[in-house]
């Protein structure tokens, strides 16, 4: 699925927080949106799904396969969410319902969009759990979120986002709350799932070292604007903007090194 954002402006209570964003994600491309906290990257993701908070308004253009999102009705947006675009949020503990089994949550979108019965929903839940590498999928779908580890909860969130095989996956800082080892596992999983399914990916992060492991191209945001964009390899080796240079310094403080970057 292709995504084209043109002159996107987001205002909250009259204050402009995203100012004139333009970028494109080709079918099957992996794009990163990177910036410090408050740069507007998560609001941009929410605007793509028509999920901006109360008091926020978007203008400009957001095209999904040449169909306009801005100004779409709630019914039109409901068809897009999950069915065509899936999203994985930063903290699965808050994204998951604590009083519903994880299997029920994985199968919720197929139930709503496709009217599946109980037996079919269980099959979907088991298949989804298996797809994201959860152990003993037939058993784990009957557990509740608090009975799973942080990494397992994030795998459930990914399974929910992929339940309807969307053409575009948005991952909003999906590894920030995880330790380094689990973070690497989730990144490997996302990259494999997106590649195998031929999905497009928008990956949001503040960490250039993380971005280097999953995206091919990126836009760098600062104070609601894009200050640099291009292939990730170029941002890693020849950053032009002070914002990107600062992100690169932060990345070098981790275990990542530029010469370890594998070109994709």
Image (cartoon, rainbow, N blue to C red):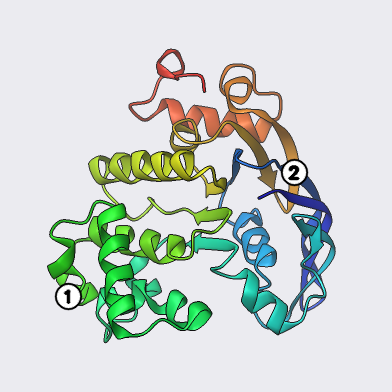
Within 10 Å of the Cα at label 2, are there few (<14), some (14-19), or many (20+) other Cα atoms?
Answer: some
Identify the residue at horizontal 73%, vertical 54% (top origin): 224
Q: In this rendering, is residue 4 above or below 166?
A: above
What element does badge 1 sit on?
loop
Q: Position of residue 264 (x, y in %)?
A: 52, 23
Q: Position of residue 93 (x, y in %)?
A: 32, 70
Residue 100 numbered mark, or none: none
* Foreground residue among 170 and 83: 83
Q: Position of residue 22 (x, y in %)?
A: 80, 47
Task: For marks 2 and 1, give the CA distance.
Answer: 40 Å
Q: In this rendering, is residue 137 above or below 122?
A: above
Pointer 2 residue: 24
- Can residue 89 be seen in the rendering of this structure? no
Q: Position of residue 168 (x, y in %)?
A: 58, 53
Ranked by sequence position, the earlier of labels 2 and 1 is 2
* Foreground residue among 173 and 223: 173
Q: Quadrant of residue 48?
A: bottom right
Q: Quadrant of residue 106?
A: bottom left
Q: Are marks 2 and 1 in contact (CB under 8 Å)?
A: no
Pointer 1 residue: 143
Identify the residue at horizontal 57%, vertical 32% (top origin): 246
Identify the residue at horizontal 47%, vertical 53% (top origin): 173
Identify the residue at horizontal 29%, vertical 61% (top origin): 127
């Amino acid at each position: 699925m292709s995504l084209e954002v043109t002159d996107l402006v987001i205002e909250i209570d009259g204050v402009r927080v995203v100012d004139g964003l333009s970028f494109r994600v080709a079918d099957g491309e992996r794009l990163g949106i990177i910036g410090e906290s408050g740069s507007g990257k998560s609001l941009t993701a929410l605007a793509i799904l028509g999920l901006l908070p109360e008091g926020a308004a978007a203008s400009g253009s957001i095209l999904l396969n040449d169909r306009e999102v801005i100004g779409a009705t709630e019914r039109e947006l409901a068809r897009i969410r999950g069915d065509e675009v899936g999203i994985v949020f930063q903290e699965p503990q808050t994204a998951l319902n604590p009083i519903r089994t994880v299997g029920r949550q994985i199968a919720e979108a197929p139930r709503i969009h496709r009217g599946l019965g109980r037996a079919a929903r269980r099959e979907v839940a088991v298949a989804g759990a298996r797809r994201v590498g959860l152990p003993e999928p037939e058993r784990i779908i009957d557990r509740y979120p608090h009975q799973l580890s942080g990494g397992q909860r994030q795998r459930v969130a990914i399974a929910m986002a992929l339940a309807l095989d969307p053409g575009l996956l948005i991952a909003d800082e999906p590894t920030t709350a995880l330790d380094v080892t689990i973070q690497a596992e989730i990144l490997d999983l996302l990259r494999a799932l997106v590649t195998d399914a031929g999905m497009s990916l928008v990956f949001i992060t503040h960490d250039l070292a993380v971005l280097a492991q999953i995206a091919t191209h990126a836009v760098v945001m600062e104070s609601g604007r894009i200050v640099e964009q291009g292939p990730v390899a170029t941002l890693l080796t020849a950053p032009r903007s002070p914002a990107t240079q600062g992100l690169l310094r932060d990345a070098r403080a981790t275990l990542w090194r530029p010469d370890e970057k594998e070109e994709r």
